[in-house]
Image (cartoon, rainbow, N blue to C red):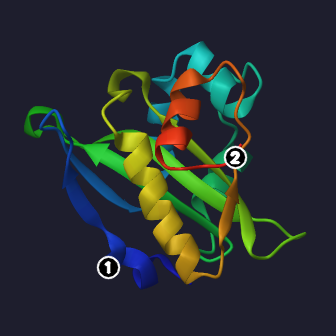
């Protein structure tokens, strides 16, 4: 699939605090937004997401995260427009289908620290699950550190099995 094949999935939501968030499938041109969002993650958030003390994204990682096929590898991005300014990337959720079980995928979510606890991660996961079901994926596998209490709470709220 090409980006234009999934453009119709774009949507907008209003969060419980009144923040308007725009959500759409990631595009190959989203590298700068991805880097900006990554740079706004605290070292702790980076560690919780990547399980290592990552201090930057390499060009190869940026390509891997943005140049996807929209079927076996799908990603949503969330943007806000603070005070009518330029769009600011605040979250990403993705799945990558596993080769061992084509009905399952590994999933991951990252939300910038300045937008934690607004419901963006849960919203991204719900949208991700809807797309996954349409592509024959019935289960997500998420690797979550035991000290990532926010993600564990979000998974419990969505009815995940540990």
Q: Which residue is mark 2?
A: 142
Q: Disc 2 to disc 1, how far (Cα)?
A: 27 Å
Task: Name the residue furthest right.
Answer: 100
Residue at 37% in and 51% down: 123
Crowding near pointer 2: few (<14 within 10 Å), some, many (20+)?
Answer: some
Left or right for 101, reference 114: right
Residue at 26% in and 65% down: 11
Q: Is residue 144 above or below residue 13?
A: above
Q: Position of residue 161 (x, y in %)?
A: 67, 48
Q: Are marks 2 and 1 in contact (CB under 8 Å)?
A: no
Q: Is residue 104 above or below residue 149?
A: below
The N terminus - image quarter? bottom right
Q: Earlier in the sequence, mark 2 or mark 1?
A: 1
Please tell me whether mark 2 sits on a helix, a strand or a loop: loop
Q: How many numbered marks does the figure carry?
A: 2
Left or right for 111, reference 43: left
Q: Which residue is mark 1?
A: 8
Q: Position of residue 158 (x, y in %)?
A: 48, 49
Residue 145 visible, this orientation: yes
Task: Name the residue furthest top.
Answer: 43
Residue 26 visible, this orientation: no
Q: Position of residue 76 (x, y in %)?
A: 46, 58
Foreground disc of the pair 2, 1 = 2
């Amino acid at each position: 699939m090409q980006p234009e094949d999934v453009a119709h999935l774009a949507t907008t939501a209003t969060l419980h605090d009144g923040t308007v968030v725009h959500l759409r499938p990631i595009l190959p041109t989203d590298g700068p937004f991805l880097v900006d969002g990554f740079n706004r993650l605290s070292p702790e958030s980076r560690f919780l997401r990547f399980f290592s003390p990552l201090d930057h994204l390499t060009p190869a990682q940026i390509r891997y995260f943005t140049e996807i096929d929209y079927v076996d590898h799908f990603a949503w991005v969330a943007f806000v427009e603070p005070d009518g300014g330029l769009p600011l990337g605040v979250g990403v959720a993705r799945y990558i289908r596993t080769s061992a079980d084509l009905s399952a995928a590994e999933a991951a979510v990252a939300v910038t620290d300045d937008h934690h606890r607004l419901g963006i991660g849960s919203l991204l996961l719900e949208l991700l699950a809807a797309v996954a079901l349409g592509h024959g994926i019935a289960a997500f596998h998420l690797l979550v550190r035991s000290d990532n209490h926010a993600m564990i709470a979000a998974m419990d709220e969505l009815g995940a099995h540990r």
